[in-house]
Image (spheres, rainbow, N blue to C red):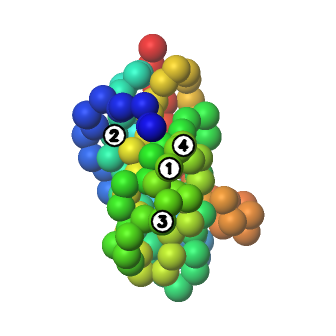
Amino acid sequence: SLESLPQASTSRAWNLGFGSGAWQISGLDFDHDRIDVRPRHRTTERWSFTNNSNRVHPMHIHGFLFRVLDRSSGPVHAGERLGWKDTIGVQPQETVTVQPWFGPYSGRYVFHCHALEHADRAMMLQLEVEA
């Protein structure tokens, strides 16, 4: 059976799409001087990734694992529902909701589309977890 998780402390929505000549998350390009989100250490959150494009976006969170909660396109299959994940494919015109666990580590990390040509073109944001 799966370990229980604390209740999510907040919910965040991330829109995946193309804008300003590049793939973006919520209309933002990567900026190494900007922290885009600051989850609290040893908490969980609900993150929804909505893909507004015609390309699959495999979303990856560095340093942290998550549970897959929901897919707007249909049921979450057993391989996604059971256990921890660090990457989830978000299909075109789909929303996938995950619950990351921001422990045991603190520090600065990125989350991004794991498609190489998308990450290389700045489809990446930063999170910082403070101990």
Residue pictured at 43% horizontal, 31% vertical: 3
Label 2 packing within 10 angstroms: few (<14), some (14-19), many (20+): many
The amino acid on which the numbered mark 3 sits, given as a three-letter code, is: His
- Which disc, if any, is residue 77? 3
Q: Which residue is mark 1?
A: 82
Q: Which residue is mark 2?
A: 45
From mark 3 to mark 1, how far is it between C-alphas? 9 Å
Q: Is residue 33 above or below residue 43?
A: below
Q: Secondary structure at mark 4?
A: loop
Q: Position of residue 41 (x, y in %)?
A: 41, 22
From the viewer's perspective, is 74 left or right of 91?
Answer: left
Ranked by sequence position, the earlier of labels 2 and 1 is 2
Q: Nearer the viewer, residue 8 or 54?
A: 8
Label 1 packing within 10 angstroms: few (<14), some (14-19), many (20+): few
- Which disc, if any, is residue 84? 4
- The quarter of the displayed image where residue 64 is located: top right
From mark 2 to mark 4, how far is it between C-alphas? 14 Å
The amino acid on which the numbered mark 1 sits, given as a three-letter code, is: Leu
Tell me whether circle 3 and circle 4 mark residues in contact (CB < 8 Å). no
Q: Nearer the viewer, mark 2 or mark 1?
A: 1
Residue pictured at 73% horizontal, 68% vertical: 117
The amino acid on which the numbered mark 4 sits, given as a three-letter code, is: Trp
From mark 2 to mark 3, how far is it between C-alphas? 21 Å
Q: Secondary structure at mark 3?
A: loop
